[in-house]
Amino acid sequence: MKNFRQSRNHRPKKNRLITGATDVIRALKENIQLDRIFILATFNNAVTDQLKKLAAECGVPVNKVPIEKLNSFNTGEHNGCVAMLSKIKYSNLQDLISFSFENSLLPLFVMLDGITDIRNIGAIARSAYAMGVTALIIPEKGVGALNEDAIFTSAGALEHLPVCRVNSLMKAVDELHLNGIKVYATEMTAQKNIFEVDFKDPCAIVMGGEEQGIYPASLKICDEQLKIPMPGNFESLNVSVATGMVLYEAIRQRFR
């Protein structure tokens, strides 16, 4: 069996990289799916300003990094800019919502807030795809990269499950609300448990990182908070396990 840890430090393959700000700008204009852009921290000119503006419009994260990081890609001449081609085809959130309602499908989204471990993200995607989730919603920043390791951990589910990458989770919650979709936040101190919440309506479930949970600002704008009842009085579950449990309850209610 392949060891997950062995692949974590692999460099991206050269054929999955675009080098040079001009070529990266061209890729953005041609709507080529990019996972992330790295630019030299000391670069600040009209070209990089254009690149950052286009990247923001396309929802592609831009990271300012030292020269050592760019050299680590081993691409030869990078001219201070390297972009990683995405293996994930990202979807527009409103397009997926509209498609669901137009085709009489009951939306069920999973939103990831502050989850950085790619193995957890891969496992969540695997459960979400099996449970018929409409899409994962992830932020541009503050979440683990959906790279080859994440795809491997998901058993390939990330290549089939729609993923929406948004520049703000709070704006995404607003968009869900505007479309009549309830948003439930998982929180250990919640008063309601997952068996007391109605998942039969269009909804989204927010899962937070194991250390900090869901950010307070995000918690405030969710419709309700819910928890998994644990008779064993244990403090927490792995986030991918918890996601699978919540999703199973949602599907159980919908198939009753």
Image (cartoon, rainbow, N blue to C red):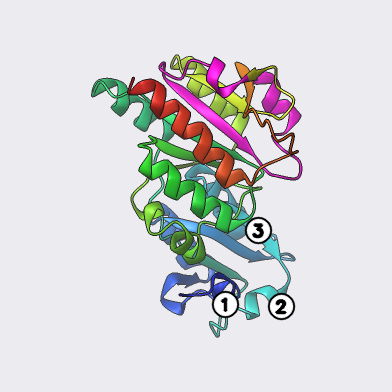
Can you give x and y, in whole percent of width and height, for residue 84 in the image?
A: 50, 65
Q: Report, in whole angstroms, how far the alpha carbon at label 1 lies from the one at label 2.
A: 22 Å
Q: Is 235 placed left or right of 245 in the picture?
A: right
Residue at horizontal 56%, vertical 25%?
A: 173
For residue 168, above or below residue 101? below
In the image, what residue type sits under mark 1? Gln
Q: Is 192 placed left or right of 104 in the picture?
A: right
Camera-side mark, 1 or 3: 1
First-in-chain label (1 vs 2) = 1
Q: Which residues are magenta?
A: 193-222
For residue 74, above or below residue 255? below
Q: Give the labeled residue for mark 3.
A: 63
First-in-chain label (2 vs 3) = 3
Graded by Cα atoms within 10 Å as few (under 14), some (14 to 19) or many (20 or more), the crowding at tag 3 reads: some
Q: Report, in whole angstroms, how far the alpha carbon at label 1 lies from the one at label 3.
A: 25 Å
Q: Give the labeled residue for mark 2.
A: 68
Q: Give the labeled residue for mark 1.
A: 6
Tag 1 near tag 3, CB within 8 Å = no
For residue 157, above or below residue 97? below
Graded by Cα atoms within 10 Å as few (under 14), some (14 to 19) or many (20 or more), the crowding at tag 2 reads: few
Quarter location, residue 170: top right
Q: Name the one closer to the observer, 242 or 73.
A: 242
Can you give x and y, in whole percent of width and height, for residue 139 in the image?
A: 58, 42
Can you give x and y, in whole percent of width and height, for residue 184 in the image?
A: 57, 23
Q: Secondary structure at mark 3?
A: strand
In the image, what residue type sits under mark 3? Asn
Residue at horizontal 47%, vertical 75%?
A: 2
Residue at horizontal 53%, vertical 82%?
A: 75
Residue at horizontal 60%, vertical 36%?
A: 207
Q: Name the one closer to the observer, 113 or 84.
A: 113
